[in-house]
Image (cartoon, helix red, strand yellow):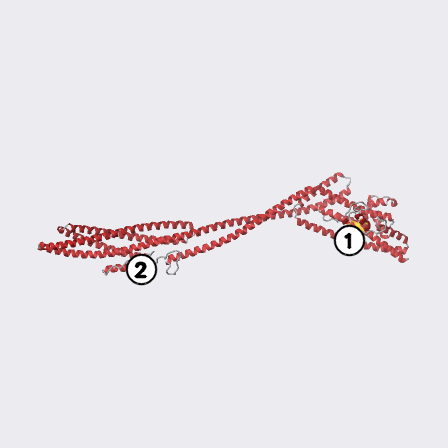
Amino acid sequence: MRSRDERAATGRGERYERVVGVVTNEWNSARAAIEALCARVGVRESAKASTEDASDGAGHGDAFIARLLKSAGETLVGVDGGAGGKRKRGDDDDAVKETVEELEDGASTFDDEEREALVRSLRDKADETKARLAAVIDVIDGKFANDVDAEAKKRIDALEASRMKLKRDYDALSHAYLRDSGKVKELQGELDELEVQLAVTRRRLAIAKANGGDDTGETIEGLPKMATAEDARAAGAQIEAKAAAGDKGGADTPGRPGTPAGAQVSSTELTKLKGDVAELEAKVKHNEKTINDLTKEKTDMAIKLRALGDGQNFGRSRGEAAIKRLSSADARADELDARLTHVVKARDELEVRVRALSEKQDTSAAKEEQIKMLDIVQKENKVLKDENTRFKESYALFDQAKIDKAAAEARVKSLEQSATEKKTSKAADLEKEITALKEKLAAAEATAATANAALEEKQAEVMAFVEEIEAISGAYDEAQEQSNRLLGRIAKSEEAQNKAVSEKLVAQSAAKKFEDECERISETAAYYKRDLENAYARTQELEGQLAEATEAFTKMQQETSSNAEVTDRSKAQLSAMEKQIVDVRAKLNSSEQTVATLMQRSERELASLEAEKAARVKAESTAQALKKKCERLVREGGATDLQAEVDAYKHVLNCNVCQGERQKAVIITRCWHMFCEECVQKRIASRARKCPGCSLAFAESDVQRLYW
């Protein structure tokens, strides 16, 4: 008998645990709906009210049952009205305490109908809570969905368009910067190469101008070999040797010195040449004086020999003309010597200026200066060429005078022959006079021969000077060509350098523009980041305010349900706060929303896990209490009451549709009603998908397996 009572008590305890599990599931589903609503409106501390409510039943043995009975207290008032009298709304706490005490000490007077009413009241309360929360969500969504979604979408689209535009601008600027950087590097390399080539050319030009290219063996490609100081000294030595040979009255006059093209005369050698020219001028003057004396003597002789014939007078006049032309030639030689000195000096100055200009930094001024020097050199060359032409013409006249002199001498000889023929017919005094005249004529001829030798020597020297002038003119022409080529090269290098500098400036400006644009984009990004941070902070603040307002609104609605004016004002404040939250939340990033959602989900799961743990602990404590109660009932012999309670639990456990043929095995999560699997599957197969208990439509996915 005792064993049967224990088994009955055990079955009763299991059925009681199943009932508690059903109630727990219903309550958890209600809490999940409440958490969903809190997540929608931004309330993070959803369990605050539950904690405050639970504190009322802290003195009881099972706080979880107290919470459930307190939530269903209003319904229990109507159910228990016949047995214990009607309970007022203010007596809910006392009723809950009494019910909990009855369940704990085993003195509960609930029958089967009351227990079913309790379960139904809990389910109805859960359904009502979920329906109310769903209605709140629908109202909020219906009120703010259109405006909030449109404004948020518009704001998000604007931000996305701005972000894409900034990204495109940044990519374009990055591409332009990389392209310009590569081009700047190439131009910089070309500019460096041109600068190196220009420096090498200038250095080689300076070396060539200083050393003439013979000492080092270096010459500039495309330029002729320049004359050196050794060439000028060799030419001066030849002239001195020739002058010394003329003073000694040696043999034949040496040939023209081989003066190289482009000879350059130093200042010392020029001074020496000037001294030689002065000495030659003195000799020429002495010879002119001697010639003048001889001319006078010839004039006296002509007067005395007028009787010899007009031919002798004509020859004498031609000789005087030749002597005058010789004098003019000497004067022209002096003028050419002075011109040569001036040209050499100008050439040295031009070389110094060209060398200085090649080292100048300002290329445009150097170019203009070189052009001016080239004009000066061209003018000097033209003057020298004209002088050379006139000098050649004067030498041609001098040669003609020599020819005329030879003709005059031939005429004199013919006259002498005629005089010899007439000698026999002349008197003895005439012979003496003729002899004296012959002696004088011989002396004059000797003097004329000496003058002719000096004249030939002077002519050779003048020709040497002419050749040297021609060589200098050729050197100037070559220097002019060389300067033109160098100016062309310098102009090309300057043009390339200016082009590279301009491109470099353009690239630098583009790079500067790109840096400014990047800085502007960075500032814009920082501004948007600060705006998002401020919006997030404002959202947090408003969410806290909304949580407080929601809690205050809930309490106010419970405490002052009859006060419509206060309720309307609270609703207006709540709507204003919700609108501010929606306006600010539109600025938040999707990643932050995802993180917040994940955090809320984790909090809900943690709360659910804690609730399940608490329910398990409470169920275990309840099972222990029931076990104690069963033991007490066995000791006291209350098998009839225990059997009645077991039958009631069986009725609750069995399916209501098939009238207890099968146990409840599935639950519809839409309304949280439980039935056997066969009954639910029949409705699914017949497409009559409505709950048999409340006629609420459900889907196949809403049917979940239930394990006891």
Q: Which mark is residue 391?
A: none
Q: Residue at x 33, y 54 (%)?
A: 472
Report x, y in % for residue 624: 83, 56
Q: Which residue is mark 2?
A: 234
Amino acid carrying label 1: it is Glu
In the image shown, does 84 or 199 lie closer to the viewer? 199
Q: Give the SS element for disc 2.
A: helix
Q: How many marks?
A: 2
Report x, y in % for residue 5: 89, 56
Q: Which residue is mark 1?
A: 612
**Residues at marks 1 and 2, CA–CA distance in whole angstroms:** 124 Å
Q: Residues within 10 Å of mark 2 (few under 14, many from 20)?
A: some
Q: Residues within 10 Å of mark 1 (few under 14, many from 20)?
A: some
Nearest to viewer (mark 1 / mark 2): 2
Quadrant hosting residue 444: bottom left
The reply to whether residue 399 is visible in this rendering is yes
> Which quadrant, please, contains the C terminus?
bottom right
Q: Residue at x 75, y 53 (%)?
A: 609
The reply to whether residue 638 is visible in this rendering is no
Compared across the picture, whether 327 is left or right of 267 comes to left
Farthest top residue in view? 565
Amino acid carrying label 2: it is Ala
- Mark 1 vs mark 2: which is more N-terminal? 2
In the image shown, does 205 or 2 lie closer to the viewer? 205
Report x, y in % for residue 313: 16, 50
> Which quadrant, please, contains the N terminus?
bottom right
Image marks 1 and 2: residues in contact by CB distance under 8 Å: no
Compared across the picture, whether 89 is left or right of 434 comes to right
Report x, y in % for residue 125: 80, 46
Compared across the picture, whether 460 is left or right of 703 comes to left
Q: Give the SS element for disc 1.
A: helix
